[in-house]
Image (cartoon, helix red, strand yellow):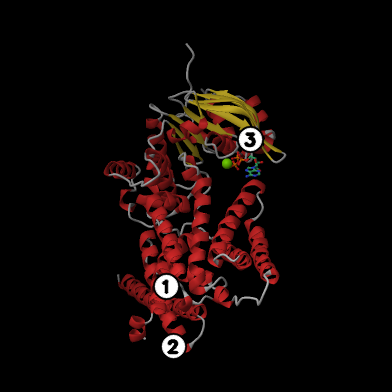
Amino acid sequence: MTMTYAIEIRSLSVYYNNLCALDSVNLNVKEQEFLGIIGPSGGGKSTLLKSVLNLVKPSSGSIKIFGQPLRLSLNQIGYVPQNIRFDRHFPINVKDVVLMGRISRHKPLFLRYKQADLTIVSQILKDLEIGHLIDRQIGQLSGGQLQRVLLARALAVEPRILLLDEPTSNVDSYSKTLIYSILKELSRRIAVIVVTHDIWAISSLIDQVACLNVKLHYHGGTELNDEIIQNVFGCPVDLIAHGVPHRIYRAHEGV
Amino acid sequence: MIDALLEYKFLQNAVISAVLASIACGIIGTIVMEKRLVMMSGGIAHTAFGGIGMGYYLKIEPILGALAFSIFSSLTIIKIKRSTFTNPDILIGMFWSLGMAIGILFIAITPGYPPDMTSYLFGDILTVSRFDLWIISVLDVLVIITIVTLYNVFKAYMFDEEFVSVSGIRTSILEYLLFVLIAITVVILIRVVGIILVIALFTAPPAIAKLFTYNLKRIMLISTILGSAFCLIGLWFSYEMHISSGASIVLITVLSYVSISITRRMLKKEGRVHVTSGMVDIAENMQKG
Ligand SMILES: Nc1ncnc2c1ncn2[C@@H]1O[C@H](COP(=O)(O)OP(=O)(O)OP(=O)(O)O)[C@@H](O)[C@H]1O
Ligand SMILES: [Mg+2]
């Protein structure tokens, strides 16, 4: 019996013009896996997520979602982008932003959100402790509040796969703990993939680590070794002395 | 003018077309403002001039030529933008002038006395014919039906295109559709304010509306009401003073925008004074405490 993975990436390469962002990456993610992706800036982490979301075209290779081609399964994925691409003065409130997560549940023609959608949305907002912001205009939120709203929108999809691109880069440590405990809970049921520079903070929560720097240098348990870190980050002294990987490495050295 | 309105068919046509144009303009203008497509709309409007010239040359209704040209050019602009990643500004600039050039070329090669183009350039709402009115109505209904059908999808698309695409909706279709709607609305407006003045009517009413509400539907509604008011006042001006309707409507529209935003600014400043005095109170209390 062959196992169906939540995500199955086969020798994926992505080029932007002549720049190689990903080079024959193979990666399988199980249905209930909590995967952290680390790697240097420009290592292709965002590109990998965007490929899974069909936002960038791969130059070669294939991606399957639950054994199906991408196009058919986009509605199973929730996504929190790294950068905010929209205008914060756009006339829309928190409720309507989070309701966007429900779009894939309906036919686009005559799409009207139902009471059930609203119930889901207000429950998620409550879980993320931002229920009181439901009628706020999107421009009147703080950076951290906005990040939680974007997470809420991804959760409103009720996804089977959740992709988060540095979801806690903008929030205080309390929110960070809250968000990761919610993600941990979710990862018992669905696949959760987090790109983060904070991996040390969550190394006890995640099941697997992937180290990405154009090539996928490592994918496995959270016990990294020196050699992998050097391979991924290239410049051992500087980055390892000040960067995050040092800590994850050290944290596991003592074990 | 009220007596005249009851008496003259051409004035009735003018009033009806003003209101119809304002509906399409209020809805699409809001989208244009939020999606930052103002210059794109200006470009599409000017390519319509080529169609008007072609209409005269082929002896078909110029407004139909304008419709064909503006739809065709808007679709072409996206097509090129999508396949070559050319900066849309560059494409807009070229199409803008190209459309005008083609129009002038057609008029030059049209045999006989050259037609008067000013009514298309600056609008002449008092000469709206039954046929024009008929076209305007059909196009208006098309715009309204499309937006009602896809309102929530369009709203999401306007806000965050990437997320809509991630939800499995083909955003390229929405983009093409939106551009066709812009082209249609431009054509509706050509009879009312003319090619050159379309942009003001696209932008000012939604911009004013946005000063008062952060609700998209309400912005569209208020823009429609404001647009109608500006057009009707402009129409009255145009009738009484014998100047082109486009010029008078645009003058009224822009003057309204300027005066409303200045008034609002002044009110806000007063508001800020209140806030400061409130803070002084707090500071005093703290000193006492
Ligand atoms: N739209 C684009 N056009 C051209 N090059 C791009 C584009 N997006 C990313 N790149 C390039 O691809 C490489 C990978 O970028 P990517 O955004 O995936 O990195 P990342 O690992 O997410 O980095 P960070 O940690 O800084 O977010 C970089 O070298 C970047 O310059
Ligand atoms: Mg990134």
Q: Can you say whether A50 is above or below A92 in the image?
A: above
Disc 1 packing (10 Å; few <14; some 14–19; many ≥20): many
Disc 2 packing (10 Å; few <14; some 14–19; many ≥20): few
| The quarter of the displayed image where residue B196 is located | bottom right
Q: Tell me the distance, in whole angstroms, between the alpha carbons under discs 1 and 2.
A: 17 Å
Under circle 2, the secondary element is: helix
Callout in the foreground (3, 2): 2
Percent position (x, y) of residue A101? 40, 42
Residue with the mark numbered 2: B240
The subunit letter for the residue under badge 3 reads A
Check disc 1 and give the amino acid type. Answer: Ala
Which disc number belongs to residue A240? 3
Residue with the mark numbered 1: B18
Under circle 1, the secondary element is: helix
Q: Is mark 1 within 8 Å of ligand 1?
A: no
Q: Tell me the distance, in whole angstroms, between the alpha carbons under discs 3 and 2.
A: 79 Å
Q: Is residue B121 left or right of residue B24?
A: right
Q: Can you say whether B166 is above or below A73 in the image?
A: below
Check disc 3 and give the amino acid type. Answer: Ile
Q: Is residue A224 visible?
A: no
